[in-house]
Image (spheres, rainbow, N blue to C red):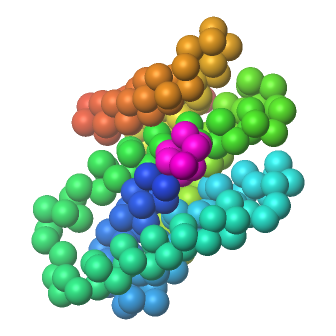
Amino acid sequence: MLSLTETIEIAAVVTGAVYGVLLARRHGMDFVGVFSVSFMTAFGGGTLRDVLLDRHPLFWIRFEHYPVLVFIVCAITSLIRRTPGWLHKSLNLPDALGLGLFSVAGTQAALDCGTSGFVAIIFGVITGTFGGVIGDIVCNEIPSLFRPHTPLYATCAFTGGLVYVTAIGLQVPAEVASAVSISMIVLLRLIALKWNICLPGM
């Protein structure tokens, strides 16, 4: 029986892989490139989290079916010779889903390691955002996290993590806290993208 954290991580890995596939195919990469970018977007943030928390083996090594899932996603999409143009324009949805899922999974993992609530939220932000950062760098793009006038990104992850930690502190069932936090992150991210809501400049 899968734990709640594992269930969220599996969903996050799949959405992260889908985002990586779309990102790589937008740049015309072959299967090796697609798999590499998908692997990095799916596991980059969680790997950094595990290294900083000294969690060994890394989560995608401990659960060896995670890389297999990424490979399957890439293999299936490689059978589609030409990705519809509208699908490339839909990067926002897997991006927002991956942000929400990974952020909550990262926050929970940090809490399980005994960190304080605030530190756990930071780890949630790292887990949710750095896979995309690595994917953008490999695709020779300025990471969206660091672009000026970028719609709210890390802020969404932080807000969702804060809601999750607060809910857990109030003894709200983890399943409910996770669902509410993930939904909030996804909704905030999509709203920020639609209306181009950004933090004010310094």
Quadrant of res 50? bottom right
The picture places residue 4, in percent across and down from the top left corner, at 55, 40
The picture places residue 22, in percent across and down from the top left corner, at 32, 69
Taking depth in this image into account, of 8 and 189 the one nearest to the observer is 8
Residue furthest front in the image: 1
Taking depth in this image into account, of 60 and 149 the one nearest to the observer is 60
Give the residue displayed 47% in from the left and 22% down from the top: 176
For residue 6, above or below residue 69? above
Taking depth in this image into account, of 26 and 174 the one nearest to the observer is 174
The picture places residue 184, in percent across and down from the top left corner, at 41, 26
115 left or right of 165?
Answer: right
Report if residue 5 lies within the magenta region.
yes
Magenta-colored segment: predominant secondary structure: helix
Taking depth in this image into account, of 41 and 113 the one nearest to the observer is 113
Q: Over which residues does the magenta segment extend?
A: 1-9
Residue 6 in sight: yes
For residue 165, above or below residue 19? above
Residue furthest top in the image: 170
146 left or right of 141?
Answer: right
Report if residue 24 lies within the magenta region.
no
The picture places residue 32, in percent across and down from the top left corner, at 46, 90
Residue 199 in sight: no
In which quadrant of the rendered image does the C terminus lie? Answer: top right
Give the residue displayed 13% in from the left and 62% down from the top: 86
Give the residue displayed 72% in from the left and 51% down from the top: 49
Disc count in the image?
0
